[in-house]
Image (tube, grey):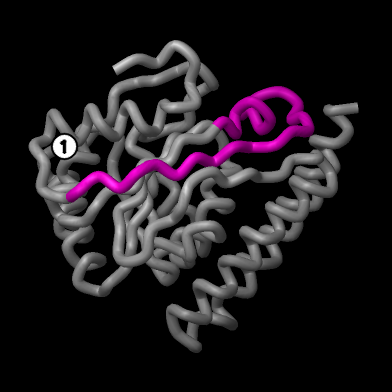
Amino acid sequence: MNWLRTILYQIVFYSGSVLIVLAVPLVAPFGQKATIHHAHRWARLNRWAARVFLGVTTRVEGEIPEGQLLFAAKHQSMYETTELQLILGGPAMVLKRELSRIPLWGWATKLYGSMSVDREASAKALRRLMAEGKELRAQGRSVIVYPEGTRVTPGESPPLRSGFAGLYKAVNLPVVPIALDSGRFMPKKGPKRPGVVTIRVGTPIPAGLPRKEIEQRVWQAINALEPGAQG
């Protein structure tokens, strides 16, 4: 049954996604606000499809602070990449560079507000990340980053990628860590299953801390729902 539900979800979500992306050129001339509104249609499509076909819903724990912030979230599935955009009010995104190269979709992410990073984290890539982070800071946008760099399976707590500390320094914003357990119900491989995804919003961490301290505090906070993860 879970396989059937998963297949139905994928058919509906990906078919709808193609239509939404193809409509981006029609929306783009109306500016970034219109583009963000259009992108949130895609996020709502995923929320609806996950609820109707998979029986997956979301529970948010904690309060989302007001103001310009840097959100640092655990990453276990594609689900949170759209769900958090709705919950957090549409922050700019930090994406893998290969995603920005997808025809039309990559262009759409730039219109929405995003910066792309290389997995290799070369000195040149880090300088570019810091420059783009400063630009978004000047624009007044909050930013969301998945500091582990890629999706991980439940129970995994890898160290943060080196680019996070550079971004933290560049934007000079308080960090709001976010723990979640979406991988329990929306795994990268295999059938998805019903359940309630918990998204736990942590206490803001101030800007300007030393690298070792900010990395340790964020690592601990985003792994708060991981059994066995210790500081």
> Is residue 106 shown above or below 22?
above
- Kindly state the secondary structure of the residue where label 1 is placed: loop
Q: Position of residue 85 (x, y in %)?
A: 51, 58
Seen at 74% across and 60% down, the residue is: 16
Q: Nearer the viewer, residue 84 or 11?
A: 84
> Is residue 169 shown above or below 19?
above
Callout count = 1
Left or right, 171 with respect to 37, comes to: left
Q: Quadrant of the C terminus?
A: top left
- Residue span colored magenta: 181-206
Q: Is residue 29 magenta?
A: no
Q: Which residue is situated farthest in the bottom direction here?
A: 30
Seen at 30% across and 48% down, the residue is: 204
The dominant secondary structure in magenta is: loop
Q: Position of residue 34 (x, y in %)?
A: 52, 81
User: Based on the displayed image, in which of its 4 quarters is residue 39 positioned?
Assistant: bottom right
User: Which residue bears the numbered disc 1?
Assistant: 122
Q: Position of residue 62 (x, y in %)?
A: 48, 46
Seen at 66% across and 45% down, the residue is: 58
Crowding at mark 1 (Cα within 10 Å: few <14, some 14-19, many 20+): few
Seen at 75% across and 46% down, the residue is: 50
